[in-house]
Amino acid sequence: MRNVSVLGCGWLGLPLAEALVRSGFSVKGSVTLVEKSDQLITLGIEPFLLILERGHVELSSPRFFESEVLIVNIPPRRVPDIETVFPEQIGQLIFLLEKYGIGKVIFVSSTSVYPDTGGFVVSEDSNLPPEKASGRALLKAEKMLMQNGRFKTTVLRFGGLIGPGRDPSRFLTRKKEIINGNVPVNLIHQEDCIRIILGLIENEEWGDVFNACGPVHPLKKEFYGLASAVSGIKAPTFEDTEQVPGHKIVDSSKLINRLNYRFKYPSPLDWLLQ
């Protein structure tokens, strides 16, 4: 299996496509602006224009779907009717998958499909309704893809994404309210995201759901306190309460055990300290 298409060559999708090329895959990548095509070509990625809009699909060539695996990396946009718009986009994508016959899909989802649970641990088996509209939209999309018998879908629920270009100091400059410092964080570094996707493909892990989040969950006051020290930006004010109100801890042990995976950054503090 050496042919992969990446739908969404943005912050995660582009370096992922690069890593696939370095690993010997033939890689196609989608763009929504023709001007971005040259960047992909330079990196050894064959570019295709693909636009999935409400009531409108634009595809430069069906050759984009001539791959064994499609990686879907298009997060729902923050629009008022997100719970309708995003599933409609996925429905349009499913039509193309059925039409052109890709057999395997990796859908990049998010741990926002789980509600905040007062400090309880959530696993892939946790049957809890999402609180956020984006989480509900993602959960609908997951079900649409996984329930389709024409292809096999693996869902990958990433925690909060950190890495190049996502400096936590930007968060610090925006925060003016008091933050509960005793809330644990659920974060994953870009490099671990990429290595995990490569592992799923190499190990032929299809038709399942995996959480993907660093196994160490420091408190917000630890993570953002260190981030402020590293960046030199003043830390936000932390509320130091004893109880942790309404925040989940994401368990990724299923993924770790199935892939025998070792995180490069088990804790987000490891990234800040490098």
Image: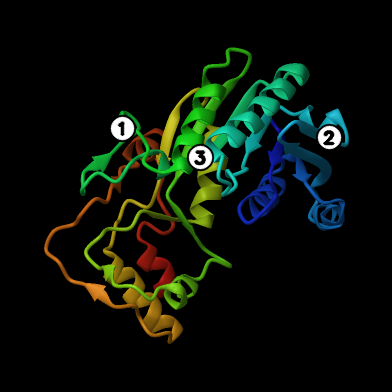
User: In the image, residue 140 lies at what x, y percent?
Assistant: 50, 28
Residue 109 circle label? 3
Query: Which residue appears farthest toward the top when viewing the image?
Result: 149
Q: In the drawing, does residue 154 fall left or right of residue 112?
A: right
Q: Residue under circle 2?
A: 59
Query: Is tag 3's residue or tag 2's residue first in the polypeptide sequence?
Result: 2
Q: What secondary structure is found at the residue carrying circle 3?
A: strand
Within the image, what quadrant is residue 172 found in? bottom left
Within the image, what quadrant is residue 28 found in? top right
Q: In the drawing, does residue 105 fall left or right of residue 66?
A: left
Task: Note whether 179 is above or below 60 in the view shown.
Answer: below
Task: Note whether 172 is above or below 35 in the view shown.
Answer: below
Q: In the drawing, does residue 190 fall left or right of residue 52?
A: left
Q: Residue under circle 1?
A: 128
Query: Which residue appears farthest toward the left when viewing the image?
Result: 242
Residue 8 circle label? none
Q: CA distance from mark 3 to mark 2?
A: 23 Å
Q: Is residue 274 visible in the rendered structure shown here?
A: no
